[in-house]
Amino acid sequence: MMRCKSLPVLVLVLFQFSMVNSQVKVEREHRIKKNQFPETAHEFIKEKLDEAKKIRFYKETDTTKISYEAKFKKDKLYYSIEFDESGKLEDIEILINEVDVPDESWLKITKFLKEKFTKYKIRKIQQQYPVNSDEPTETTLNNAFQNLLIPSLNYELMVWGKIQDDHSDFEILFGAEGDFKKMRESLPANYDHVLY
């Protein structure tokens, strides 16, 4: 009889553990050769990025999917273009500074950070142009390369944050107006390649 009473408690504990665990972004990114990149994505890059410098190719795996990323420098800005496994464009990101975010949006973002964390440090800010199914990828590409502030863009922040006594790295997504969209805990960078 004692075992039957503890079963619901065990199920509840396992459910809560799985819910907490699902918010952790287990993402690993590693550099790959050009010939390991999806062919359709490589063709897209060759066609659209003729002025890009220092193009590097990466494979990114996380708990839900595999994606591919091309990172490069163009017009003095650092870009990242993400593709799915089949080579379909997912989003374009530009590395920016806080002064590049409109004041009203930045106020909302910092208000959220101050309310969420007892202490925090912003490690990286990216302006993200997700592919919209209503418009052609050419439009997304043009918007990103012109660095336009449009309503469909997002701001992705990599933040080290402290909540009570626990601290961790987080990936937080905000809309163009600074409205919170989602937050995931992320693991620290993979340093498996470093030899001691």
Image: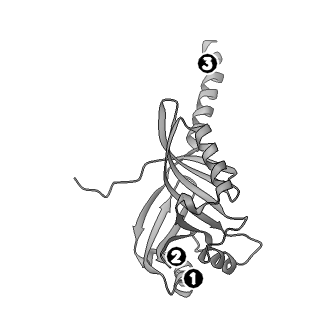
Mark 3 surroundings within 10 Å by alpha-carbon count, few (fewer than 14), some (14 through 19), many (20 or more) = few
Of the residues shown, which amino acid type is indicated by label 3? Ser
Q: In the picture shown, does residue 95 fall above or below 177? A: below
Q: 95 left or right of 189?
A: right
Q: Which mark is residue 38?
A: 2
**Residue projecting furthest to the right:** 134
Q: Which mark is residue 44?
A: 1
Q: Nearer the viewer, mark 1 or mark 3?
A: 1
Q: In the picture shown, does residue 180 fall above or below 74? A: above
Q: Quadrant of residue 16?
A: top right
Q: Find the distance from the CA under tag 1 to the CA under tag 2.
A: 10 Å
Q: Nearer the viewer, mark 1 or mark 2?
A: 1
Mark 1 surroundings within 10 Å by alpha-carbon count, few (fewer than 14), some (14 through 19), many (20 or more) = few
Q: Quadrant of residue 30?
A: bottom left
Q: Nearer the viewer, mark 3 or mark 2?
A: 2
Q: Quadrant of residue 21?
A: top right
**Residue projecting furthest to the top:** 1
Q: Nearer the viewer, residue 26 or 135?
A: 135
Among the two numbered marks 1 and 2 on one chain, the one whose residue lies closer to the N terminus:
2
Residue under label 3: 6
